[in-house]
Image (cartoon, rainbow, N blue to C red):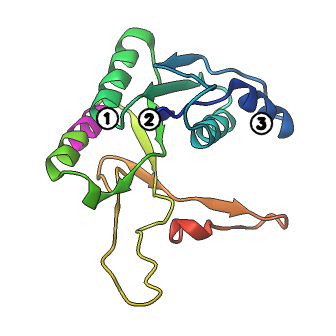
Amino acid sequence: VAEFEEAYFFPSDLTAFQQQFGLIKRNVSHIIGPNHPEEGYLAEASTDTQYASASAPALPLWVFSHEQFDLVEWAQTAMTQVDCCQGPRVHSISWGSPESEFDVGLMRRWNVEFLKLGLMGHSILVASGDHGEGNPGWVRCRPFQVQFPASSPFVTAVGGTVLSDSNSESAWQWSGGG
């Protein structure tokens, strides 16, 4: 799980989540970088960690925490951990913003790092964004606002879904369609 910008998770929230849903109790096995749950932004980091623990209960759970949204630093840290410590080869990133907010050269640099990870056998799963393409078009059509890194050709973009009480699944209404 990749976390950025002083987003931290509460270990106690992870335990409560596992108990509430009858999951196997397991702790985060490796925290690379800071995790100060008494400060910072907690909601997304805790949710990411909880669902990663539920999605792959037999695998060690790693959290990579970086103070800045720097995907070069994150990717290089991930590569180093595999080389030295048998780190994870499946990664989750829920951070991102519209492509228009990033310098094209910086996105190219990040794509090089994603490509390197892919060539090393890593999979990178990235949230498609809280608002899909960012263009509700309620009044008039506007250009799409594609989210990066979800738009990178070297990652797998994943949209949100919601399970209802009737055991049906639908796209999360704020994701622009899932």
Q: CA distance from mark 3 to mark 1?
A: 29 Å
Residue 139, horizontal then vertical, whole percent: 44, 90
| Residue projecting furthest to the top | 84
Q: Where is mark 1, residue-wise?
A: 70
Residue 112 counted in the magenta span: yes
Q: Residue at x 76, y 67 (%)?
A: 168
Q: Amino acid at mark 3?
A: Phe
The image quadrant that residue 118 belongs to is: top left
Question: Which span is picked out in magenta?
Answer: 111-119
Marker disc for residue 17: 3
Query: x%, y% of residue 13?
Result: 73, 32
Residue 62 lies, in percent from the top left, at: 54, 24
What residue is shown at x 43% (from left), y 84% (from top)? 137
Q: Residue at x 40, y 29 (%)?
A: 67
Residue at 53% x, 71% y is: 177
Q: If the image is split into quadrants, where does the C terminus sit?
A: bottom right
Image mark for residue 4: 2
**Left or right of 125, for residue 155:** left
Name the side, left or right, on which 71 lies relative to 38.
left
- The residue positioned farthest toward the left in the image shown: 105
